[in-house]
Amino acid sequence: MRVLALSLADDRRRFERDLPPKGAQLLLNPDLEIAQLCSRARGDEIIYQDEKAEIPDLTVPSDLVVVNTDFWQESRVKEIATEARSLGKRVVLFGPRATIRHQDFAGVADSVVCGSILNAWPELRRDALQDRLQRTYHASPNPEHGRFDLKAVFKPGFDPDFQCLRAVIGCRCPPQMKPFCRQYLYHGDRLQQRDLRELAAEVLALRRKHVYLLDDDVALDPEFYTRFFARVWHQKREWTVLAGERIFDDSRYLRLLAKAGVRVISLNESWLNLERLNRILASRSFARRMANQIGLLHRRRLLAGARISLFLEPGQEIDYESTYRAIEPLGIDFLQVRFFARPAPDQPFAPLFVPYESGLEANRPTWWKSRFYGLGSIIRRSLRRPVRVGFYSTFRYYYPRSFAYRQNLLEGIAYPP
């Protein structure tokens, strides 16, 4: 069976003919769910098209069109599905948007998958071959692993050094982020810790040095990750990991991560939010404690990123200029800011994509990003890093990522950063 798998992009990132892909190459990566589907559907031919790198061609011969739906893409999904069905194609929608609002796509597509398409694929494939697709497929919520076949989904313009791994399947993100977490939408509170021997073999098969560990929080189960990194230590890989505030509970664990090759720790929303920023401004002792935690990472030669998610109520105003005075002294190396808003207090939050604008004023949401990734700010931070972090991490990780985030900001790409 020939399957056309589509990954969509927002307007700011959509590919234009005769132009290079938009955004920094370091942050241009393939659709990981389709990469897993390519690995799972070995007996089928998966034709991958990505709107970040090409203009979709729906006329290519295919037996089935599957489209990954993200939160902000409802109108684009309907447009693509309508066009594909007008060409006589059978269309299946999956992804987080299809999972939580499958009723919105009634009549738009032949089928909608609620949950992980990996879990639904055997049944979906069988029905597609027999030409009796169901309206809705409810995938099993049990976590299942599928390898990332990144070769099958690589496109010119993407980062050629990108590779990733998932050791724990399931959601461990902060509570406020769960409505927007694929792992939570697919699996709820279910978790699966993968076999350590299997993980070590997968790491050994990775060709390049740097690996993104996709797990939500390596601080929630130090014993498991201690065993994991003890297994892969000798393979000399370098890692970027995501962690919550509990990462600072045990300095010995931080020392282990540093020795095992972790180069960047990205702190999730449990470490820094708007409430804590206001508390930093009000309490010198609390501000000192937060800065000391970043200093602890730097002393272990670890770069520190921070993710902040702002949930904006209708009519809410934030003094971005004053709160930025709380961010800068912390000494973090990378800042990722996401915005969520809702039109009315009784409605759910939805992602809000706020592009950078020239002549930015302090009352605009992207004020933090423009200040943090200003050329002078990047250089000032770098002058303090080499002694504590080391020249290797500074030039191998700090500069490339900082300028990649800056490029995305200047091109108006909302996230990252």
Image: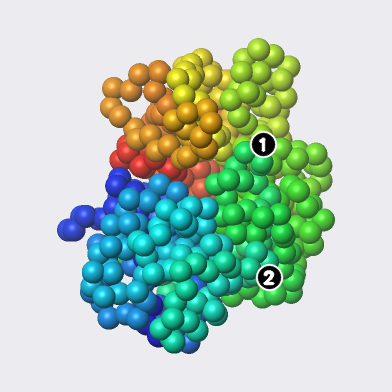
Kind of residue at badge 1: Ser
Who's the residue at 39% across and 23% down the image?
A: 364
Q: On the image, which quarter does residue 414 sit in? A: top left
Q: Residue 335: x percent and y percent? A: 51, 36
Q: Is residue 137 above or below residue 399?
A: below
126 on left or right of 303: left
Tell me what residue is drawn at x 33 percent, y 50 percent. 75
Q: Position of residue 223 (x, y in %)?
A: 82, 56
Quadrant location, the N terminus: bottom left
Residue 220 drawn above or below residue 107: above
Q: Residue 307 occupies which quadrant of the picture?
A: top right
Task: Confirm or deny contact between disc 1 and disc 2 (CB under 8 A).
Answer: no
Identify the residue at image location x=33%, y=23%.
360
Question: Is 204 in front, or is 350?
Answer: 350
Label 2: element kind: helix
Numbered tag placed on residue 270 in the rendering = 1
Q: Nearer the viewer, residue 49 or 398?
A: 49
- Camera-nearest residue between 289 and 319: 319
Kind of residue at badge 2 = Leu
From the top left corner, tell me how far across and down residue 238 is, in percent. Answer: 60, 57
Q: Is residue 86 left or right of residue 270?
A: left
- Residue behind mark 2: 199
Residue 378: tell me if it is visible.
no
SS category of the residue bearing label 1: loop
How much space separates mark 1 and mark 2, taking CA atoms?
27 Å
